[in-house]
Amino acid sequence: MDLLPLVQVIAREGRLEEEMFLTTFLLDEAKHVEFFHVLTHEVAQGGDLEGFHGESYRRIFYEELPRAMNRLLQDPSPEAQVEAAVTYNVIVEGVLAETGYHAYRRAAEVVGERGLGLPGTLEGVGYVQRDESRHIAYGLYLLSRHLAQDPSLWGVLDRRMDQLLPLALGVVQEIFAAYPEGFPLGLEVGEFVGYAVDQFQKRYRRLQLARGQGLREIERIALEAEG
C-alpha cells in the first residue's frame, strides 16, 4: 500500500507512538478498500471504474502519489517526507476524499427526496470519513513538526501544494465533464470545485499557523486534538 514507505521511515527514526498510529492507519485503509468494493460491486453493481479516471486523476494517483511515497524508500529526508505528506494527507485525503464524501451526502439528499433512502451507505461513508479525519490530522501534525524543526521546509510544502491543487480540481472537473448533457441528479460542478478549494484552504491556513509555532506548541496541539 502507498503508506508503507512512510511507516518504515517513521519506524527507523524511532518514533514509536507515530509508528503505532500508522499501523492503525494501514488497517483503516484496508477496511475502506473493502467497504468501497462492496458498495460499488455489490450494492451499485458497478463494473470497471477506470473510465472515470481522467488525465488529472491519472497524474495524481498513477504518478505523483506513488512517486512521492516510493521516494521515501531511498530518500527519507525531511524534504521527501513533506512532499509525501502533502500528496497523501493534504491533497488525496484532505481535498479529494473529503470532496468525495460531500458528493456522497449530496447525492443521498437528492435520491432521498425521490423516495430512495441510503442509510447504510451514509453510515459507512460516515465511518470512513471519521477515520480519514484522523489521518489528515496526523499528516498536518507531521508537516507541522517538520516546519517547527526547519522553517525553510515551507518552500517545499508551498511548492508541492501549488503543484497539486490544479490537478485536484481537475479531478473534480473531469468527472463532471464526462457528462456533457448534465451530471446525474442535477448536481453542479461549481459546488464541488468550491468545496474542494475550501478544504485546501482550511489545511493551508493550519499549516501557515504552524510556521510560527515551536515544537512544544505543535505537540500540545496534537495532544489536545487527541483528547
Image (cartoon, rainbow, N blue to C red):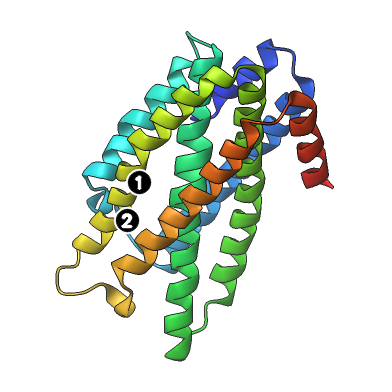
Q: Residue furthest top?
A: 74
Q: Secondary structure at mark 1?
A: helix
**Label at residue 168:** 1
Q: CA distance from mark 2 to mark 1?
A: 7 Å
Amino acid beneath label 2: Val
The answer to whether residue 164 shows anywhere in this view is yes
Note whether 148 is above or below 207 in the view shown: above
- Residue 61 seen in render: no
Horizontal placement of 124 versus 84: left or right? right
- Which numbered tag is attached to residue 62? none
Q: Amino acid at mark 1?
A: Ala
Instruction: In this rendered view, identify the residue nearer to me: 107 or 224.
Output: 224
Judged from this view, the residue extending furthest toward the front is 212
Report the residue marked by disc 2: 172
Q: Residue at x 50, y 61 (%)?
A: 101
Q: Residues within 10 Å of mark 1 (few under 14, many from 20)?
A: many
Residue at image point 67% right, 26% down: 145
Residue 224, by quadrant, is: top right
* Residue 3 x, y percent position in the rendering: 54, 29
Neighbours of disc 2 within 10 Å: few (<14), some (14-19), many (20+): many
Could you say where residue 52 lies in the image, as x and y percent from the top left? 26, 54
In the rendered image, which quarter is residue 7 located in? top right
Position in image of residue 15 (x %, y %): 74, 19
Dots 2, 1 in contact, CB < 8 A: yes
Give the residue at x 76% y 38%: 222
Give the vertical position of 95 relative to 77 (above or below).
Answer: below
Q: Residue at x 49, y 30 (%)?
A: 2
Image spot of residue 184 (x, y percent):
28, 75
Label 2 SS: helix
